[in-house]
Amino acid sequence: MSNIILKIDNVQKSFGGLKALSDLFLEVEEGKVHAIIGPNGAGKSTMLNVCIGRLAPDSGTVTFNGQNMIGKQPHEINQAGISRVFQTPEIFPDLSILQNVMIPAMARREGSFKFNMFRSLSSETEIVDEAYKVLEDIGLLDQLHHHAGSMSRGDKRRLELAMCLVQHPKLLLLDEPTAGMARHDTNKTIDLLKKIKERGMTKVIIEHDMHVVFSVADHISVLAQGTIIASGTPDEIRGNPKVQEAYLGGAHL
């Protein structure tokens, strides 16, 4: 029997007269890669912001590992085991790549970001070793002392992913992980996502690039006008006329 790690049930969210999410229902199976696709303005980023506590829904519940996340602060949700990679990388541009990865590792251990970062980082050999390992896995070990702000867009996205992975999340949310990347960087990111997939970490990916979606997803849900209109395996979604009409104006995926 499958284990549902994330359940979004009857979630609604409006901004003034605009209904961003309407009776949204979604279940994510533990250990799977669940892709969310849909046209711009469908409510995908709003859905993720509700999941991580950046937005409060008007109604409904978000249950993670059996606990309702509604009403919890973002840091509490992060500590519960949910991490998110944003559309625009949220890194520390004036710090080194190594320091960027060590900070969330320290925050995970301390329970918050409220610690003397520079005093702690300089003496934490265990954290250094862990950061080295993640950077090696992510393909950035050769740049560990570079300033993060000088990196390419693709490398910044991978750095933010490393900053999430070092926290050992149970659920990783990725919002457009290949947006704005050249094809070379996109292919490197696909390889990286496949590598992470082999470890069994649950992931929810919002992505417009169908090559990425069909390369990594176990399950795909289609969001349109704030609600899920179809959900199934990649083959089922690829051949769904309703999805083709809503997402690509009738063109085949």
Image (spheres, grey):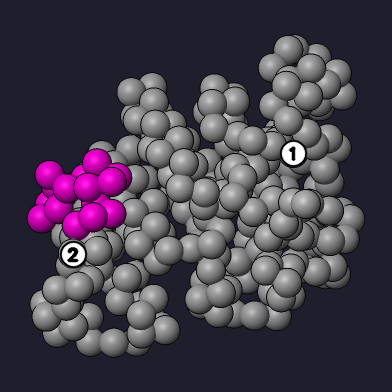
Q: Amino acid at mark 1?
A: Ser
Crowd tier of the residue under label 2, counting other residues whose Cα lies within 10 Å: few below 14, some 14–19, many 20 or above: few
User: Distance between the Cα atoms at labels 1 and 2?
Assistant: 38 Å
Q: Residues within 10 Å of mark 1 (few under 14, many from 20)?
A: many
Q: Residue at x 39, y 76 (%)?
A: 108
Q: Which mark is residue 144?
A: none
Q: Is 207 in front, or is 80?
A: 80
Q: Residue at x 83, y 35 (%)?
A: 230
Q: Please report contact status of discs 1 and 2: CB closer than 8 Å, yes or no.
A: no
| Chain part drawn in magenta | 132-147
Q: In which quadrant of the rendered view does residue 47 lie? A: bottom right
> Residue visible at 68% across and 47% down?
44
Q: Amino acid at mark 2?
A: Asp
Residue named by callout 2: 129
Find residue 221 and name its label.
1
Residue 92 in percent (x, y) is at 28, 63
Q: What element does badge 1 sit on? A: strand
Q: Is residue 127 left or right of residue 17?
A: left
**Whether residue 157 is visible:** yes
Residue at the spot x=83%, y=53% of the render? 25
**Residue 251 at what x, y percent from top left?**
75, 12
